[in-house]
Image: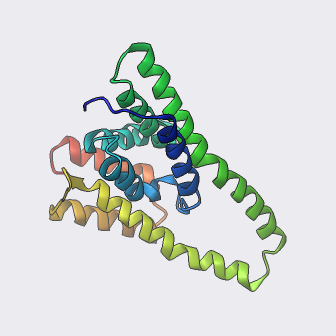
Amino acid sequence: MNPITLQASDWLNLFLYYLSLSLLAVGGAIATTPEMHRFLVERQVWLTDVQFNASIAIAQAAPGPNVLFIALLGWNVGMNAAGQQGSAGWSLGLLGALLCMLGMVLPSATLTWMATRWAQRNRERRSVRAFKQGMAPLVIGMLLATAWVLGRVNGVPRTDGLLWGLTAISALLVWRTRLHLLWLLAAGALLGAIGWV
Protein backbone atom coordinates (compact mmCIF):
# COMPACT_ATOMS: atom_id res chain seq x y z
CA MET A 1 0.00 0.00 0.00
CA ASN A 2 1.19 3.52 -0.74
CA PRO A 3 1.96 5.67 2.30
CA ILE A 4 -1.00 7.60 3.65
CA THR A 5 -0.92 11.04 5.22
CA LEU A 6 -2.51 11.46 8.64
CA GLN A 7 -2.84 14.83 10.32
CA ALA A 8 -3.33 15.32 14.07
CA SER A 9 -7.07 15.60 13.42
CA ASP A 10 -7.02 12.18 11.71
CA TRP A 11 -5.38 10.57 14.75
CA LEU A 12 -7.97 12.22 16.98
CA ASN A 13 -10.72 11.02 14.62
CA LEU A 14 -9.34 7.47 14.85
CA PHE A 15 -9.40 7.62 18.66
CA LEU A 16 -12.91 9.10 18.76
CA TYR A 17 -14.14 6.53 16.25
CA TYR A 18 -13.00 3.65 18.47
CA LEU A 19 -14.31 5.48 21.54
CA SER A 20 -17.81 5.51 20.02
CA LEU A 21 -17.50 2.02 18.51
CA SER A 22 -16.62 0.63 21.92
CA LEU A 23 -20.16 1.15 23.12
CA LEU A 24 -21.50 -0.98 20.24
CA ALA A 25 -19.20 -3.92 21.00
CA VAL A 26 -21.88 -5.83 22.88
CA GLY A 27 -20.73 -9.26 21.67
CA GLY A 28 -17.08 -8.31 22.03
CA ALA A 29 -14.90 -6.24 19.74
CA ILE A 30 -15.04 -8.87 17.00
CA ALA A 31 -18.77 -8.22 16.60
CA THR A 32 -18.02 -4.72 15.29
CA THR A 33 -15.68 -5.96 12.55
CA PRO A 34 -18.01 -5.07 9.66
CA GLU A 35 -18.21 -1.46 10.83
CA MET A 36 -14.41 -1.28 11.27
CA HIS A 37 -13.95 -2.62 7.76
CA ARG A 38 -16.31 0.00 6.37
CA PHE A 39 -14.46 2.80 8.18
CA LEU A 40 -10.80 1.75 7.83
CA VAL A 41 -10.83 0.07 4.39
CA GLU A 42 -13.75 1.47 2.42
CA ARG A 43 -14.22 5.00 3.75
CA GLN A 44 -10.80 6.21 4.95
CA VAL A 45 -8.68 3.82 2.83
CA TRP A 46 -6.12 3.61 5.62
CA LEU A 47 -5.85 -0.19 5.27
CA THR A 48 -6.19 -2.72 2.46
CA ASP A 49 -8.50 -5.74 2.60
CA VAL A 50 -5.44 -7.97 3.01
CA GLN A 51 -4.07 -5.94 5.94
CA PHE A 52 -7.49 -5.88 7.61
CA ASN A 53 -8.07 -9.63 7.31
CA ALA A 54 -4.48 -10.49 8.25
CA SER A 55 -4.70 -8.35 11.40
CA ILE A 56 -7.74 -10.27 12.55
CA ALA A 57 -6.32 -13.67 11.61
CA ILE A 58 -3.00 -13.07 13.38
CA ALA A 59 -4.66 -11.77 16.55
CA GLN A 60 -7.16 -14.63 16.66
CA ALA A 61 -4.38 -17.20 16.20
CA ALA A 62 -2.26 -15.67 18.97
CA PRO A 63 -2.87 -16.56 22.60
CA GLY A 64 -4.57 -13.92 24.69
CA PRO A 65 -7.73 -11.86 24.39
CA ASN A 66 -9.31 -11.59 20.96
CA VAL A 67 -9.49 -7.78 21.27
CA LEU A 68 -5.81 -7.69 20.28
CA PHE A 69 -6.83 -7.38 16.62
CA ILE A 70 -7.80 -3.77 17.42
CA ALA A 71 -4.18 -3.04 18.31
CA LEU A 72 -3.00 -4.68 15.09
CA LEU A 73 -5.41 -2.62 13.02
CA GLY A 74 -4.09 0.56 14.69
CA TRP A 75 -0.52 -0.67 14.23
CA ASN A 76 -1.10 -1.14 10.50
CA VAL A 77 -2.69 2.29 10.15
CA GLY A 78 0.40 3.79 11.83
CA MET A 79 2.80 1.77 9.69
CA ASN A 80 0.96 2.86 6.54
CA ALA A 81 1.15 6.48 7.70
CA ALA A 82 4.92 6.14 8.07
CA GLY A 83 5.35 4.29 4.80
CA GLN A 84 6.59 1.20 6.70
CA GLN A 85 9.87 3.00 7.44
CA GLY A 86 12.14 2.26 10.43
CA SER A 87 11.70 4.07 13.72
CA ALA A 88 9.04 6.39 12.33
CA GLY A 89 7.00 3.32 11.37
CA TRP A 90 7.43 1.84 14.84
CA SER A 91 6.50 5.13 16.52
CA LEU A 92 3.39 5.70 14.45
CA GLY A 93 2.51 2.01 14.67
CA LEU A 94 2.62 2.19 18.46
CA LEU A 95 0.62 5.41 18.42
CA GLY A 96 -2.06 3.80 16.25
CA ALA A 97 -2.20 0.67 18.42
CA LEU A 98 -2.44 2.73 21.61
CA LEU A 99 -5.14 5.08 20.30
CA CYS A 100 -7.27 2.24 18.98
CA MET A 101 -6.95 0.09 22.10
CA LEU A 102 -7.61 2.96 24.52
CA GLY A 103 -10.57 4.08 22.45
CA MET A 104 -12.01 0.56 22.36
CA VAL A 105 -11.36 -0.47 25.95
CA LEU A 106 -11.85 2.66 28.06
CA PRO A 107 -15.59 3.37 27.56
CA SER A 108 -16.74 -0.23 27.45
CA ALA A 109 -14.69 -1.22 30.51
CA THR A 110 -16.01 1.73 32.51
CA LEU A 111 -19.60 1.16 31.42
CA THR A 112 -19.35 -2.60 32.03
CA TRP A 113 -17.98 -2.10 35.50
CA MET A 114 -20.73 0.36 36.44
CA ALA A 115 -23.54 -1.65 34.79
CA THR A 116 -22.41 -4.92 36.34
CA ARG A 117 -22.42 -3.44 39.82
CA TRP A 118 -25.89 -1.99 39.26
CA ALA A 119 -27.28 -5.19 37.64
CA GLN A 120 -25.91 -7.33 40.46
CA ARG A 121 -27.70 -5.19 43.03
CA ASN A 122 -30.93 -5.25 40.97
CA ARG A 123 -30.77 -8.76 39.45
CA GLU A 124 -34.33 -9.65 40.47
CA ARG A 125 -35.91 -6.75 38.59
CA ARG A 126 -37.95 -7.73 35.59
CA SER A 127 -36.27 -5.08 33.43
CA VAL A 128 -32.80 -6.48 34.15
CA ARG A 129 -33.87 -10.02 33.22
CA ALA A 130 -35.60 -8.74 30.06
CA PHE A 131 -32.50 -6.79 29.03
CA LYS A 132 -30.31 -9.88 29.34
CA GLN A 133 -32.71 -11.95 27.25
CA GLY A 134 -33.12 -9.20 24.65
CA MET A 135 -29.38 -8.83 24.07
CA ALA A 136 -28.93 -12.42 22.87
CA PRO A 137 -30.41 -11.92 19.34
CA LEU A 138 -28.41 -8.71 18.89
CA VAL A 139 -25.13 -10.42 19.74
CA ILE A 140 -25.91 -13.36 17.45
CA GLY A 141 -26.76 -11.01 14.57
CA MET A 142 -23.54 -9.04 14.99
CA LEU A 143 -21.47 -12.24 15.04
CA LEU A 144 -23.19 -13.48 11.88
CA ALA A 145 -22.37 -10.17 10.16
CA THR A 146 -18.74 -10.64 11.22
CA ALA A 147 -18.70 -14.15 9.75
CA TRP A 148 -20.09 -12.74 6.49
CA VAL A 149 -17.37 -10.07 6.23
CA LEU A 150 -14.54 -12.45 7.12
CA GLY A 151 -15.91 -15.14 4.77
CA ARG A 152 -15.38 -12.93 1.74
CA VAL A 153 -12.46 -13.22 -0.62
CA ASN A 154 -11.44 -9.92 -2.25
CA GLY A 155 -14.80 -8.43 -1.35
CA VAL A 156 -16.83 -11.25 -2.94
CA PRO A 157 -18.88 -13.55 -0.65
CA ARG A 158 -17.75 -17.17 -0.72
CA THR A 159 -20.22 -19.60 -2.22
CA ASP A 160 -18.44 -22.72 -1.00
CA GLY A 161 -21.26 -24.95 0.25
CA LEU A 162 -18.89 -27.13 2.29
CA LEU A 163 -17.54 -24.11 4.19
CA TRP A 164 -21.02 -22.81 5.02
CA GLY A 165 -22.18 -26.34 5.92
CA LEU A 166 -19.28 -26.78 8.33
CA THR A 167 -20.05 -23.38 9.82
CA ALA A 168 -23.67 -24.39 10.41
CA ILE A 169 -22.67 -27.75 11.91
CA SER A 170 -20.15 -26.06 14.21
CA ALA A 171 -22.76 -23.52 15.34
CA LEU A 172 -25.23 -26.32 16.11
CA LEU A 173 -22.61 -28.30 18.03
CA VAL A 174 -21.70 -25.28 20.14
CA TRP A 175 -25.36 -24.48 20.77
CA ARG A 176 -26.66 -27.97 21.53
CA THR A 177 -23.70 -29.83 23.11
CA ARG A 178 -21.02 -29.25 25.69
CA LEU A 179 -18.28 -29.93 23.16
CA HIS A 180 -15.34 -27.62 23.87
CA LEU A 181 -14.51 -25.06 21.16
CA LEU A 182 -10.89 -26.21 20.99
CA TRP A 183 -12.03 -29.55 19.58
CA LEU A 184 -13.93 -27.75 16.82
CA LEU A 185 -10.90 -25.56 16.10
CA ALA A 186 -8.71 -28.66 15.93
CA ALA A 187 -11.18 -30.34 13.55
CA GLY A 188 -11.20 -27.23 11.35
CA ALA A 189 -7.39 -27.14 11.32
CA LEU A 190 -7.28 -30.80 10.36
CA LEU A 191 -9.80 -30.34 7.54
CA GLY A 192 -7.76 -27.37 6.29
CA ALA A 193 -4.50 -29.29 6.51
CA ILE A 194 -5.83 -32.16 4.40
CA GLY A 195 -7.26 -29.69 1.88
CA TRP A 196 -11.00 -30.18 2.37
CA VAL A 197 -11.67 -26.54 3.22
Task: Please identify the residue farthest to the right as the structure is shown.
Answer: 121
**Picture quarter containing residue 148?**
bottom left
Give the answer, above or below, for where 77 lies relative to 90.
Answer: below
Is residue 1 depicted above or below 100 in this figure? Answer: above
Q: Position of residue 85 (x, y in %)?
A: 35, 17
For residue 45, side relative to residue 181 (left or right): left
Figure label count: 0
Q: Quadrant of the N terminus?
A: top left
| Residue 162 occupies quadrant | bottom left
Tell me, yes or no, if residue 65 can be seen here: no
In the picture provided, is 50 more to the left or to the right than 100? left
Toward the viewer: 96 or 4?
Answer: 4
Q: Name the residue: 41% across, 21% down.
A: 89
Residue in the image at 43% along x and 31% along y: 78
User: Is residue 76 visible to the viewer in this orientation of the structure?
Assistant: yes
- Seen as rendered, the residue at the extreme top is 86
From the top left corner, tell me how far across and down residue 177 is, in percent.
Answer: 45, 67
- Residue 158: x percent and y percent? 18, 59
Please, is residue 83 above or below residue 18 in the view?
A: above
81 lies above or below 140: above
- Residue placed at 15% from the left, 61% from the top? 160
Q: Please name whichever residue, 36 or 172, is drawn nearer the observer in this view of the structure.
A: 36
x and y percent of residue 28 in the render? 53, 56
